Amino acid sequence: MKKTTLTIVAACAAAALFAGSEYKPEQWNIAAREKFAAQRFGIFIHWGIYANYAQGEWYQQKIGIDTETYGRMKDGFCPSKFDAKEWVRVFKDAGAKYVTITSRHHDGFSLWPTKVDDGYNIANTPFRRDILGELSKACDEAGLQLNFYYSLMDWHRKDYPAGRAAKRVFGEQKGDYASYKRFMLAQIGELIDNYHPGNIWFDGEWEHCSHKDGVWHRYLDWDFDTIYDFIHSKKVLVANNNHQPIRPKEDIQLFERDLPGEGTSFSKNQPMTHDRPVEQCDVIQKNVWGYKINERSFRTPEDVCAMICRCAAKDANLLMNIGPDGSGRLPARAVEVMAEVGKWMRANGYAIYGTRGLGLVKNKDGSQTGKTRKGDKVFVITIPKGAAGYPVVETLKAE
Ligand code: GLC
Protein backbone atom coordinates (compact mmCIF):
# COMPACT_ATOMS: atom_id res chain seq x y z
CA MET A 1 0.00 0.00 0.00
CA LYS A 2 2.69 2.37 1.13
CA LYS A 3 4.78 1.51 -1.92
CA THR A 4 1.90 2.36 -4.32
CA THR A 5 1.39 5.75 -2.70
CA LEU A 6 5.07 6.54 -2.95
CA THR A 7 5.16 5.58 -6.62
CA ILE A 8 2.23 7.85 -7.35
CA VAL A 9 3.78 10.73 -5.43
CA ALA A 10 7.08 10.25 -7.29
CA ALA A 11 5.32 10.10 -10.65
CA CYS A 12 3.38 13.29 -9.90
CA ALA A 13 6.52 15.07 -8.76
CA ALA A 14 8.27 14.09 -11.98
CA ALA A 15 5.28 15.22 -14.03
CA ALA A 16 5.30 18.56 -12.26
CA LEU A 17 9.01 19.01 -12.88
CA PHE A 18 8.99 18.32 -16.58
CA ALA A 19 5.50 19.27 -17.71
CA GLY A 20 5.00 22.35 -19.87
CA SER A 21 1.92 24.48 -19.23
CA GLU A 22 -1.11 24.15 -21.57
CA TYR A 23 0.23 21.01 -23.21
CA LYS A 24 -0.15 17.73 -21.35
CA PRO A 25 2.81 15.49 -22.12
CA GLU A 26 2.06 11.79 -22.06
CA GLN A 27 3.82 9.38 -19.74
CA TRP A 28 6.36 8.23 -22.39
CA ASN A 29 7.23 11.85 -22.99
CA ILE A 30 7.79 12.67 -19.33
CA ALA A 31 9.95 9.55 -18.94
CA ALA A 32 11.98 10.48 -22.05
CA ARG A 33 12.53 14.02 -20.74
CA GLU A 34 13.77 12.66 -17.44
CA LYS A 35 16.07 10.21 -19.16
CA PHE A 36 17.49 13.01 -21.31
CA ALA A 37 18.07 15.32 -18.34
CA ALA A 38 19.84 12.60 -16.37
CA GLN A 39 22.37 12.11 -19.19
CA ARG A 40 23.86 15.58 -18.61
CA PHE A 41 26.63 15.41 -21.22
CA GLY A 42 26.43 14.84 -24.97
CA ILE A 43 28.58 15.32 -28.07
CA PHE A 44 27.36 17.46 -30.94
CA ILE A 45 28.62 16.65 -34.43
CA HIS A 46 28.53 19.12 -37.32
CA TRP A 47 29.42 17.27 -40.45
CA GLY A 48 28.57 17.49 -44.11
CA ILE A 49 30.16 18.32 -47.45
CA TYR A 50 31.24 21.64 -45.94
CA ALA A 51 33.93 19.67 -44.10
CA ASN A 52 35.73 19.42 -47.46
CA TYR A 53 35.80 23.19 -47.87
CA ALA A 54 37.25 23.23 -44.33
CA GLN A 55 35.88 26.71 -43.61
CA GLY A 56 32.99 26.00 -41.26
CA GLU A 57 29.38 25.08 -41.91
CA TRP A 58 28.32 28.57 -43.11
CA TYR A 59 30.82 28.65 -45.97
CA GLN A 60 28.25 28.52 -48.78
CA GLN A 61 26.28 31.43 -47.37
CA LYS A 62 29.34 33.47 -46.39
CA ILE A 63 30.76 33.50 -49.88
CA GLY A 64 27.24 33.68 -51.33
CA ILE A 65 27.49 30.88 -53.90
CA ASP A 66 24.54 29.15 -55.49
CA THR A 67 23.72 25.61 -54.52
CA GLU A 68 24.66 24.24 -57.94
CA THR A 69 28.26 25.44 -57.62
CA TYR A 70 28.66 24.70 -53.92
CA GLY A 71 26.95 21.33 -54.30
CA ARG A 72 29.56 20.04 -56.74
CA MET A 73 31.54 19.16 -53.64
CA LYS A 74 29.06 16.30 -53.23
CA ASP A 75 30.97 14.51 -55.98
CA GLY A 76 34.17 14.85 -53.98
CA PHE A 77 32.80 13.81 -50.61
CA CYS A 78 34.43 10.50 -49.80
CA PRO A 79 35.45 10.44 -46.11
CA SER A 80 37.46 7.24 -46.29
CA LYS A 81 38.59 7.51 -42.66
CA PHE A 82 35.04 7.62 -41.26
CA ASP A 83 34.70 4.97 -38.58
CA ALA A 84 31.52 5.28 -36.55
CA LYS A 85 32.76 2.82 -33.93
CA GLU A 86 35.91 4.84 -33.37
CA TRP A 87 33.94 8.08 -33.02
CA VAL A 88 31.63 6.46 -30.52
CA ARG A 89 34.58 5.03 -28.59
CA VAL A 90 35.97 8.58 -28.23
CA PHE A 91 32.58 9.98 -27.15
CA LYS A 92 31.87 7.24 -24.65
CA ASP A 93 35.36 7.45 -23.25
CA ALA A 94 34.79 11.20 -22.74
CA GLY A 95 31.82 10.38 -20.53
CA ALA A 96 29.16 11.45 -23.04
CA LYS A 97 25.83 9.67 -22.84
CA TYR A 98 24.44 10.83 -26.17
CA VAL A 99 25.35 12.15 -29.60
CA THR A 100 23.46 14.73 -31.64
CA ILE A 101 24.51 14.90 -35.30
CA THR A 102 23.53 17.24 -38.13
CA SER A 103 21.36 14.95 -40.24
CA ARG A 104 20.97 17.90 -42.61
CA HIS A 105 22.47 21.32 -41.99
CA HIS A 106 21.57 24.67 -43.59
CA ASP A 107 23.23 23.74 -46.89
CA GLY A 108 20.47 21.14 -47.32
CA PHE A 109 22.73 18.13 -47.84
CA SER A 110 21.48 14.97 -46.08
CA LEU A 111 23.83 12.51 -44.40
CA TRP A 112 21.53 9.55 -44.98
CA PRO A 113 20.18 8.01 -48.21
CA THR A 114 16.89 9.86 -48.07
CA LYS A 115 14.34 8.79 -50.65
CA VAL A 116 12.38 12.03 -50.63
CA ASP A 117 14.82 14.64 -51.95
CA ASP A 118 16.28 15.41 -55.36
CA GLY A 119 19.41 13.37 -54.77
CA TYR A 120 21.32 15.86 -52.62
CA ASN A 121 22.38 13.23 -50.12
CA ILE A 122 25.08 10.74 -49.16
CA ALA A 123 23.79 8.04 -51.53
CA ASN A 124 24.86 10.24 -54.45
CA THR A 125 28.44 10.80 -53.35
CA PRO A 126 31.36 8.51 -54.15
CA PHE A 127 31.18 7.42 -50.48
CA ARG A 128 27.59 6.16 -50.72
CA ARG A 129 27.59 4.62 -47.21
CA ASP A 130 24.75 5.49 -44.86
CA ILE A 131 26.54 7.63 -42.29
CA LEU A 132 23.57 7.95 -39.96
CA GLY A 133 22.89 4.23 -40.21
CA GLU A 134 26.46 3.37 -39.23
CA LEU A 135 26.48 5.88 -36.42
CA SER A 136 23.14 4.69 -35.14
CA LYS A 137 24.36 1.08 -35.04
CA ALA A 138 27.60 2.05 -33.27
CA CYS A 139 25.67 4.14 -30.72
CA ASP A 140 23.24 1.29 -30.05
CA GLU A 141 26.09 -1.14 -29.48
CA ALA A 142 27.80 1.24 -27.07
CA GLY A 143 24.62 2.23 -25.26
CA LEU A 144 24.68 5.89 -26.35
CA GLN A 145 21.53 7.72 -27.40
CA LEU A 146 21.54 9.22 -30.89
CA ASN A 147 19.65 12.46 -31.66
CA PHE A 148 19.28 14.44 -34.86
CA TYR A 149 19.91 18.09 -35.52
CA TYR A 150 17.65 19.10 -38.43
CA SER A 151 17.89 22.48 -40.13
CA LEU A 152 14.67 24.35 -40.79
CA MET A 153 16.54 26.82 -42.97
CA ASP A 154 17.65 25.51 -46.37
CA TRP A 155 20.11 26.89 -48.96
CA HIS A 156 19.33 24.32 -51.61
CA ARG A 157 15.62 23.91 -52.29
CA LYS A 158 13.50 26.11 -54.49
CA ASP A 159 10.43 25.66 -52.28
CA TYR A 160 12.14 27.09 -49.19
CA PRO A 161 10.93 30.64 -48.44
CA ALA A 162 14.23 32.49 -47.98
CA GLY A 163 14.62 34.60 -44.85
CA ARG A 164 17.38 37.03 -43.86
CA ALA A 165 20.26 34.56 -44.08
CA ALA A 166 19.11 32.38 -46.98
CA LYS A 167 18.60 35.49 -49.14
CA ARG A 168 22.34 35.79 -49.48
CA VAL A 169 22.30 32.50 -51.35
CA PHE A 170 19.03 32.75 -53.29
CA GLY A 171 18.26 36.45 -53.46
CA GLU A 172 14.51 36.91 -53.01
CA GLN A 173 12.91 33.47 -53.06
CA LYS A 174 9.27 33.21 -52.13
CA GLY A 175 9.27 29.42 -52.15
CA ASP A 176 6.29 27.28 -51.33
CA TYR A 177 6.16 26.52 -47.65
CA ALA A 178 3.41 23.89 -47.91
CA SER A 179 5.63 21.90 -50.26
CA TYR A 180 8.74 22.46 -48.11
CA LYS A 181 6.86 21.35 -45.00
CA ARG A 182 5.74 18.13 -46.74
CA PHE A 183 9.37 17.47 -47.58
CA MET A 184 10.53 18.10 -44.01
CA LEU A 185 7.84 15.85 -42.55
CA ALA A 186 8.76 13.07 -44.99
CA GLN A 187 12.46 13.38 -44.07
CA ILE A 188 11.77 13.51 -40.34
CA GLY A 189 9.58 10.42 -40.71
CA GLU A 190 12.47 8.59 -42.39
CA LEU A 191 14.92 9.70 -39.72
CA ILE A 192 12.69 8.49 -36.92
CA ASP A 193 11.56 5.24 -38.53
CA ASN A 194 15.03 4.24 -39.71
CA TYR A 195 17.24 5.33 -36.82
CA HIS A 196 15.03 5.83 -33.72
CA PRO A 197 16.52 9.07 -32.35
CA GLY A 198 15.77 10.37 -28.88
CA ASN A 199 15.06 13.89 -30.11
CA ILE A 200 14.81 16.03 -33.23
CA TRP A 201 16.79 19.23 -32.71
CA PHE A 202 15.64 22.09 -34.96
CA ASP A 203 17.69 25.11 -35.92
CA GLY A 204 17.26 28.07 -38.27
CA GLU A 205 13.83 29.39 -37.32
CA TRP A 206 15.59 32.56 -36.22
CA GLU A 207 16.13 33.69 -39.79
CA HIS A 208 12.39 34.40 -39.93
CA CYS A 209 11.99 36.33 -36.70
CA SER A 210 13.43 39.22 -34.78
CA HIS A 211 13.09 40.80 -31.39
CA LYS A 212 12.34 44.52 -31.44
CA ASP A 213 11.10 46.87 -28.71
CA GLY A 214 10.52 44.02 -26.30
CA VAL A 215 8.39 42.01 -28.73
CA TRP A 216 9.07 38.93 -30.89
CA HIS A 217 8.14 39.43 -34.55
CA ARG A 218 7.65 36.30 -36.64
CA TYR A 219 7.59 36.47 -40.43
CA LEU A 220 6.80 32.88 -41.37
CA ASP A 221 4.13 30.59 -39.98
CA TRP A 222 6.02 27.29 -39.71
CA ASP A 223 2.96 25.40 -38.43
CA PHE A 224 5.03 23.88 -35.66
CA ASP A 225 1.93 22.28 -34.16
CA THR A 226 1.71 19.87 -37.09
CA ILE A 227 5.45 19.17 -37.08
CA TYR A 228 5.66 18.68 -33.31
CA ASP A 229 2.50 16.53 -33.17
CA PHE A 230 3.93 14.31 -35.89
CA ILE A 231 7.20 13.84 -33.97
CA HIS A 232 5.37 13.23 -30.71
CA SER A 233 3.11 10.67 -32.40
CA LYS A 234 6.32 8.68 -32.97
CA LYS A 235 7.35 9.06 -29.32
CA VAL A 236 10.35 11.29 -30.01
CA LEU A 237 11.20 14.53 -28.20
CA VAL A 238 11.29 17.98 -29.81
CA ALA A 239 13.88 20.71 -29.29
CA ASN A 240 14.19 23.99 -31.17
CA ASN A 241 17.23 26.26 -31.10
CA ASN A 242 15.23 29.37 -31.95
CA HIS A 243 16.58 31.71 -29.24
CA GLN A 244 12.97 32.38 -28.17
CA PRO A 245 10.98 31.56 -25.05
CA ILE A 246 10.10 27.85 -25.06
CA ARG A 247 6.77 26.78 -26.58
CA PRO A 248 4.40 24.37 -24.82
CA LYS A 249 5.10 21.42 -27.13
CA GLU A 250 8.88 21.75 -27.03
CA ASP A 251 10.34 19.17 -24.68
CA ILE A 252 13.87 20.50 -24.23
CA GLN A 253 14.95 24.12 -23.99
CA LEU A 254 18.10 24.97 -25.90
CA PHE A 255 20.65 27.67 -25.25
CA GLU A 256 23.25 28.39 -27.89
CA ARG A 257 26.72 29.20 -26.61
CA ASP A 258 25.28 30.67 -23.45
CA LEU A 259 24.97 29.36 -19.95
CA PRO A 260 21.24 28.84 -19.41
CA GLY A 261 19.61 31.80 -17.78
CA GLU A 262 22.55 34.18 -18.22
CA GLY A 263 21.18 35.98 -21.28
CA THR A 264 24.59 37.10 -22.42
CA SER A 265 24.59 36.11 -26.09
CA PHE A 266 21.88 34.60 -28.31
CA SER A 267 19.61 34.08 -25.33
CA LYS A 268 19.17 37.76 -24.43
CA ASN A 269 15.43 37.44 -24.98
CA GLN A 270 15.08 33.85 -23.94
CA PRO A 271 14.04 33.36 -20.33
CA MET A 272 15.05 30.02 -18.83
CA THR A 273 12.31 27.51 -18.23
CA HIS A 274 12.32 25.50 -15.04
CA ASP A 275 9.73 22.95 -16.00
CA ARG A 276 11.57 21.08 -18.73
CA PRO A 277 15.07 19.78 -19.42
CA VAL A 278 17.54 22.38 -20.61
CA GLU A 279 20.59 21.97 -22.83
CA GLN A 280 23.42 24.35 -23.64
CA CYS A 281 25.22 23.66 -26.90
CA ASP A 282 28.71 24.98 -27.37
CA VAL A 283 31.84 24.64 -29.46
CA ILE A 284 35.20 23.05 -28.76
CA GLN A 285 36.89 25.15 -31.45
CA LYS A 286 35.73 28.42 -30.10
CA ASN A 287 34.29 30.15 -33.15
CA VAL A 288 32.90 27.49 -35.42
CA TRP A 289 30.81 24.30 -35.50
CA GLY A 290 31.83 22.66 -38.76
CA TYR A 291 35.48 21.79 -39.45
CA LYS A 292 37.67 24.83 -40.06
CA ILE A 293 41.25 24.08 -40.89
CA ASN A 294 42.67 27.39 -39.67
CA GLU A 295 40.70 27.57 -36.42
CA ARG A 296 43.05 26.52 -33.65
CA SER A 297 41.31 27.93 -30.59
CA PHE A 298 40.50 24.61 -28.92
CA ARG A 299 39.11 24.65 -25.42
CA THR A 300 41.17 23.00 -22.74
CA PRO A 301 39.89 19.90 -20.90
CA GLU A 302 39.66 21.99 -17.72
CA ASP A 303 37.42 24.44 -19.56
CA VAL A 304 35.13 21.69 -20.88
CA CYS A 305 34.86 20.16 -17.39
CA ALA A 306 34.06 23.60 -15.94
CA MET A 307 31.32 23.99 -18.56
CA ILE A 308 29.82 20.60 -17.69
CA CYS A 309 29.79 21.59 -14.00
CA ARG A 310 28.27 25.02 -14.60
CA CYS A 311 25.52 23.43 -16.68
CA ALA A 312 24.83 20.73 -14.10
CA ALA A 313 24.62 23.38 -11.37
CA LYS A 314 22.13 25.25 -13.57
CA ASP A 315 20.17 21.98 -13.94
CA ALA A 316 21.14 21.70 -17.60
CA ASN A 317 22.96 19.38 -19.99
CA LEU A 318 26.03 20.35 -21.99
CA LEU A 319 26.19 19.41 -25.67
CA MET A 320 29.82 19.91 -26.74
CA ASN A 321 30.45 20.18 -30.46
CA ILE A 322 33.19 18.64 -32.57
CA GLY A 323 33.51 19.16 -36.34
CA PRO A 324 35.09 16.14 -38.09
CA ASP A 325 37.23 16.84 -41.16
CA GLY A 326 36.57 15.90 -44.77
CA SER A 327 38.34 12.57 -44.36
CA GLY A 328 35.97 11.59 -41.54
CA ARG A 329 38.45 12.07 -38.71
CA LEU A 330 37.76 13.94 -35.50
CA PRO A 331 40.38 16.70 -35.09
CA ALA A 332 43.30 15.24 -33.13
CA ARG A 333 43.23 17.99 -30.50
CA ALA A 334 39.51 17.39 -29.88
CA VAL A 335 40.24 13.70 -29.28
CA GLU A 336 42.98 14.57 -26.77
CA VAL A 337 40.77 17.04 -24.93
CA MET A 338 37.91 14.54 -24.77
CA ALA A 339 40.18 11.83 -23.36
CA GLU A 340 41.14 14.15 -20.49
CA VAL A 341 37.52 15.16 -19.92
CA GLY A 342 36.72 11.44 -19.68
CA LYS A 343 39.27 10.96 -16.90
CA TRP A 344 37.66 13.73 -14.87
CA MET A 345 34.17 12.40 -15.57
CA ARG A 346 35.07 8.88 -14.48
CA ALA A 347 36.32 10.22 -11.16
CA ASN A 348 33.64 12.88 -10.59
CA GLY A 349 30.65 11.95 -12.74
CA TYR A 350 28.66 10.96 -9.63
CA ALA A 351 28.23 14.70 -8.99
CA ILE A 352 26.94 15.27 -12.54
CA TYR A 353 24.92 12.37 -14.01
CA GLY A 354 21.37 12.01 -12.76
CA THR A 355 21.63 15.01 -10.45
CA ARG A 356 19.45 18.10 -10.19
CA GLY A 357 21.10 21.50 -10.22
CA LEU A 358 20.88 23.64 -7.11
CA GLY A 359 22.54 26.78 -8.50
CA LEU A 360 25.81 28.47 -9.30
CA VAL A 361 27.44 31.44 -7.57
CA LYS A 362 30.49 33.53 -8.27
CA ASN A 363 32.97 33.90 -5.43
CA LYS A 364 35.02 36.99 -4.58
CA ASP A 365 38.22 35.39 -5.83
CA GLY A 366 36.70 34.79 -9.27
CA SER A 367 36.09 31.07 -8.73
CA GLN A 368 32.57 29.69 -8.92
CA THR A 369 30.68 27.31 -6.68
CA GLY A 370 28.03 25.08 -8.18
CA LYS A 371 25.77 22.72 -6.31
CA THR A 372 23.99 19.59 -7.47
CA ARG A 373 21.92 17.04 -5.62
CA LYS A 374 21.09 13.37 -5.88
CA GLY A 375 19.05 11.54 -3.25
CA ASP A 376 20.33 12.54 0.17
CA LYS A 377 23.63 13.89 -1.13
CA VAL A 378 24.58 17.42 -2.09
CA PHE A 379 27.68 17.95 -4.20
CA VAL A 380 29.56 21.20 -3.87
CA ILE A 381 31.69 21.85 -6.93
CA THR A 382 34.41 24.47 -6.92
CA ILE A 383 35.35 25.73 -10.37
CA PRO A 384 38.68 27.59 -10.41
CA LYS A 385 38.81 31.09 -11.88
CA GLY A 386 39.31 31.02 -15.64
CA ALA A 387 39.21 27.19 -15.52
CA ALA A 388 42.87 27.34 -14.45
CA GLY A 389 42.49 23.84 -12.97
CA TYR A 390 39.91 21.07 -12.86
CA PRO A 391 36.72 21.48 -10.81
CA VAL A 392 36.84 19.94 -7.32
CA VAL A 393 33.88 18.07 -5.83
CA GLU A 394 32.97 17.82 -2.17
CA THR A 395 30.07 15.65 -0.98
CA LEU A 396 27.71 16.73 1.79
CA LYS A 397 24.64 15.13 3.29
CA ALA A 398 21.44 16.89 2.31
CA GLU A 399 19.71 18.66 5.21
C1 GLC B 1 23.73 28.35 -35.18
C2 GLC B 1 24.38 28.18 -36.52
C3 GLC B 1 24.61 26.81 -36.90
C4 GLC B 1 24.85 25.81 -35.82
C5 GLC B 1 23.99 26.08 -34.62
C6 GLC B 1 24.29 25.15 -33.48
O1 GLC B 1 22.38 28.35 -35.23
O2 GLC B 1 23.65 28.77 -37.54
O3 GLC B 1 25.57 26.73 -37.87
O4 GLC B 1 24.50 24.60 -36.32
O5 GLC B 1 24.10 27.37 -34.24
O6 GLC B 1 23.67 25.56 -32.34
Image (cartoon, rainbow, N blue to C red):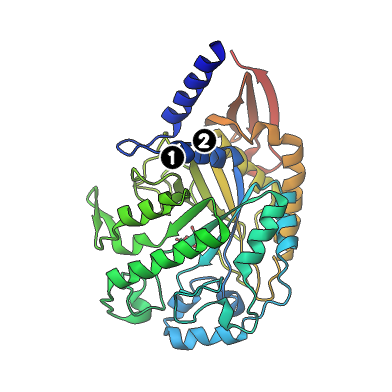
| Residue 248 vertical position relative to residue 288 in the rendered view, above or below | above
Q: Residues within 10 Å of mark 2 (few under 14, many from 20)?
A: many
Comparing 240 with 280, the one in front is: 240
In the picture, residue 351 is in which quadrant?
top right
Residue for point 47% across, 48% down? 235
Q: Disc 2 and disc 1: Cα gap in Å?
A: 8 Å
Q: Which residue is mark 1?
A: 261
Residue for point 26% across, 63% down? 220
Label 2: state its secondary structure. loop
Residue for point 58% across, 28% down? 371
The amino acid type found where label 1 is placed reads Gly
Look at the image and tell me whether residue 287 can be seen.
Answer: no
Q: Position of residue 183 (x, y in %)?
A: 38, 70
Residue 286 is labelled as none
Whether residues under marks 2 and 1 lie with C-beta atoms below 8 angstroms apart, the answer is yes
Q: Position of residue 205 (x, y in %)?
A: 36, 60
Q: Position of residue 232 (x, y in %)?
A: 42, 49
Q: Which residue is mark 2?
A: 314
In the picture, residue 344 is in which quadrant?
top right
Q: How many marks?
A: 2
- For the C terminus, the quadrant is top right
Specify whether 280 is left or right of 320: left
